[in-house]
Image (spheres, rainbow, N blue to C red):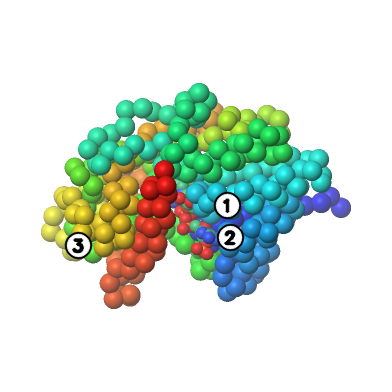
């Protein structure tokens, strides 16, 4: 009997991680995988076990457990937190142990985000620089103080030290309602971060909003296309690790088009008008008071005024093709999300900003420490 590929997943209850898990469970070679996922909730652990996933109760601050689990994995998907340096250090200790024990190079597919290349434009302009993941010198020049960057550098450092093959997925703003068994079972969060937040803010003020004049432009990608990219990379590595670049040659921007926050605001505004929730589809500028209410921090709220542009050259060269290739296709997903959030707000007696404020505080602490 051949042994199974030990896959370890951090973030299985999340939007991206739940989507990755769905695709691993339905992968043509799924019967050759042994999947372990870390979770914080014992209830979700039970539900995961029903899907054939080994669930380990662990938070990202359970360093000994993270190290121990990583030391037994062949492939690790880290989709939990792009900014947790102590957690990644524990994970890398385990990866080093795995290499020293077996002599085989573990695979680490880590998740960052295009926040790494975002400029603080306050909504006033669109970034001019277009990053390419094939331009290693350009990637190396990103400052250490950039968002997510310290963790990405730790991952690349491990690759350079020769005890892992590392790959960094760096998606832009992901959007679209996630679906599949992991979501239907109530295990994972089906919503992304940025556009759902703008939708909740719009529902709260009965009008779409934006930072400044909304001229800031961001890279955007659909969740299915994002996961296609993770799986295309995983398949290529599984087929022949030697043929796939890693470390600095293993950065993968996840992007299919670019969109301004004004355009996002218009799409949200139009959905509000269609649902009879607003009279005017034009977005207006958020006030500091609103940002404080929605994000718990004006600084974090203004993240929606940053700008970045990039190209997914490496994934395209690998044969990845986005299905939602244009901003029009991507923005068409906003109306169902508005309907989803409106229904949730009705059920909860108002818009719930708890998760967003938690995210805002994390964002604030990262931005202030840089
Ligand atoms: N969504 C995007 O557009 C996007 C784009 C680029 C990069 N990213 C980055 O990718 C990462 C995942 O994003 P997402 O949208 O999938 O977020 P999400 O839906 O909030 O999922 C986060 C996942 O990480 C887990 N997690 C977070 N903190 C943890 C901790 N201290 N201990 C254990 N588990 C923890 C969560 O577990 P619980 O269920 O227990 O909370 C959940 O499984 C984030 O770092 C995000 O910044 C996201």
Which residue does the image show at 47% across and 27% down from the upper left?
Answer: 141
Instruction: Name the spot of residue 278 as percent of width and height, x first.
Output: 16, 60
Crowding around mark 1 (Cα neighbors within 10 Å: few <14, some 14 to 19, many 20+) is few
Which residue does the image show at 20% across and 44% down from the upper left?
Answer: 212
Q: Is residue 132 above or below residue 35?
A: above
| Mark 1 lies on residue | 86
User: Quarter of the image holding residue 269?
Assistant: bottom left
Crowding around mark 2 (Cα neighbors within 10 Å: few <14, some 14 to 19, many 20+) is few
Crowding around mark 3 (Cα neighbors within 10 Å: few <14, some 14 to 19, many 20+) is few
| Mark 3 lies on residue | 205
Instruction: Name the spot of residue 69 as percent of width and height, x first.
Output: 70, 57
Work out whether residue 274 can be spotted: no
User: Quarter of the image holding residue 343?
Assistant: bottom left
- Residue at mark 1 to residue at mark 2: CA–CA distance: 8 Å
| Mark 2 lies on residue | 61
Q: Does the residue labelled 3 lie within 8 Å of ligand 1?
A: no
């Amino acid at each position: 009997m051949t042994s199974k590929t030990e896959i370890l997943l951090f973030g299985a209850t999340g939007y991206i991680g739940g989507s990755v898990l769905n695709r691993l469970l339905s992968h043509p070679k799924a019967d050759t995988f042994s999947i372990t996922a870390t979770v914080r909730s014992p209830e979700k652990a039970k539900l995961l076990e029903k899907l054939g996933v080994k669930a380990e109760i662990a938070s990202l601050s359970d360093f000994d457990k993270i190290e121990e689990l990583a030391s037994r994995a062949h492939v690790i998907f880290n989709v939990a937190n792009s900014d947790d340096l102590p957690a990644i250090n524990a994970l890398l200790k385990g990866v080093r142990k795995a290499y020293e024990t077996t002599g085989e190079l573990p695979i680490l597919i880590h998740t960052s985000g295009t926040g790494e290349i975002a400029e603080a434009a306050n909504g006033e302009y669109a970034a001019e620089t277009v990053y390419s993941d094939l331009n290693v010198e350009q990637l190396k020049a990103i400052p250490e103080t950039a968002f997510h960057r310290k963790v990405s550098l730790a991952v690349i450092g491990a690759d350079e030290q020769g005890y892992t093959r590392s790959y960094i997925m760096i998606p832009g703003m992901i959007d679209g309602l996630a679906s599949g068994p992991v979501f239907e079972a109530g295990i994972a969060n089906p919503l992304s971060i940025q556009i759902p937040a703008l939708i909740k803010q719009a529902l709260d003020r009965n009008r779409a909003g934006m930072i400044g004049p909304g001229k800031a432009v961001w890279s955007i990608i659909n969740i299915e296309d994002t996961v296609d990219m993770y799986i295309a990379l995983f398949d290529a590595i599984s087929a022949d690790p030697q043929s796939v670049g890693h470390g600095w040659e293993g950065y993968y921007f996840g992007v299919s088009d670019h969109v301004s926050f004004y355009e996002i605001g218009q799409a949200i505004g139009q959905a509000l008008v269609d649902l009879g929730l607003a009279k005017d589809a034009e977005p207006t500028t958020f006030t500091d008071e609103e940002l404080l209410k929605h994000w718990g921090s004006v600084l974090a709220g203004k993240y929606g005024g940053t700008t970045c542009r990039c190209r997914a050259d490496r994934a395209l060269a690998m044969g990845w093709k986005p299905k939602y290739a244009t901003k029009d296709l991507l923005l068409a997903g906003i109306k169902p999300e508005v309907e989803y959030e409106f229904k949730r707000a009705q059920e909860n007696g108002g818009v719930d900003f708890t998760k967003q404020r938690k995210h805002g505080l994390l964002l604030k602490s990262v931005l202030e420490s840089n």
